[in-house]
Image (spheres, rainbow, N blue to C red):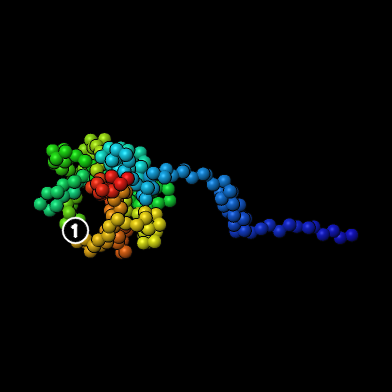
Amino acid sequence: MNTHKITKKKLPAFWLILIGSILVLALLITFQPEREKVNPNHLPWNAHYDETGQLHALGLVLNKSTLRDAMALYGKDVEVKIFSSQNNENKSIEAYFPVMYIGAIKGALALKIELMPEELEQAYNEGKAISTNPSGTREISLYGETISKYFDHPLSSITLLPRKHLTEVAIQKRFGEADKKEIQSDRLPHWFFYEKGLEMIIDNEGPEALQYSTSIQPTPAVKQAQ
């Protein structure tokens, strides 16, 4: 009597790897970690003045919050430079976060640090390198020990550069109707939202710029009506 051995065919290695990858992916989707909830006050369209006249924007309070506060929110990957005109006038010191997130919003962040004129001049004299950008503005790089002196100085303005282009419909949906719209010398539309302390520069060929400053605020008449 002849007996036949039954042999099981093995799956090729390719199929084993593919099936394993699918199972791992399914497990990752099923057990995704819960995303950290975003504080609504940190969202760009929720900037506002409080009852004392302080401007809250992106989780910071202008003229009160510091670079150290910004680093606690947006990480320590920050560059600090001094900017000036070609004749060394109009100096300012700014911190720049090349990549930051507010929930699903990805962008870059520029913060102007408030210094006394003599402090700014000292920081300028301590600079390690000078370069000129295409617009003609001079950029002065600083040593780390110089930068650390200014971690606790207040921030006087905030500029958010979102990576994703903002359509007019999206702006009106999130920010509401602008209080004022005008074309300025850069030939770009500038939209002003006074109650948010916001000037929005619209650029269809590049990222929009959302600039928060206490120089942008409701008129006295609007304040009294509120």
Total numbered circles: 1
**Residue type (three-letter) at the residue carrying disc 1:** Ser
Q: Residue at x 13, y 38 (%)?
A: 118
> Can you tell which quarter of the image residue 73 is in?
top left
Mark 1 highlights which residue? 135
| Farthest-out residue, left | 87
Assign a secondary structure to mark 1: loop
Compare residues 127 and 87 and report the one nearer the observer: 87
Residue 175 position within the rendered picture, expressed as x and y whole percent measured from the top left: 37, 54
Q: Residue at x 31, y 51 (%)?
A: 160
> Horizontal placement of 85 versus 64: left or right?
left
Q: Residues within 10 Å of mark 1 (few under 14, many from 20)?
A: few
Compare residues 25 and 154 and report the one nearer the observer: 154
Q: Residue at x 43, y 44 (%)?
A: 38
Compare residues 70 and 13 and report the one nearer the observer: 70
Residue 35 position within the rendered picture, expressed as x and y whole percent measured from the top left: 48, 45
> Can you tell which quarter of the image residue 119 is in?
top left
| Farthest-out residue, front | 225
| Farthest-out residue, right | 1
Q: Is residue 83 in sight in this rendering? A: yes
> Horizontal placement of 109 versus 134: left or right?
right
Q: Residue at x 40, y 51 (%)?
A: 105
Residue 129 position within the rendered picture, expressed as x and y whole percent measured from the top left: 18, 47
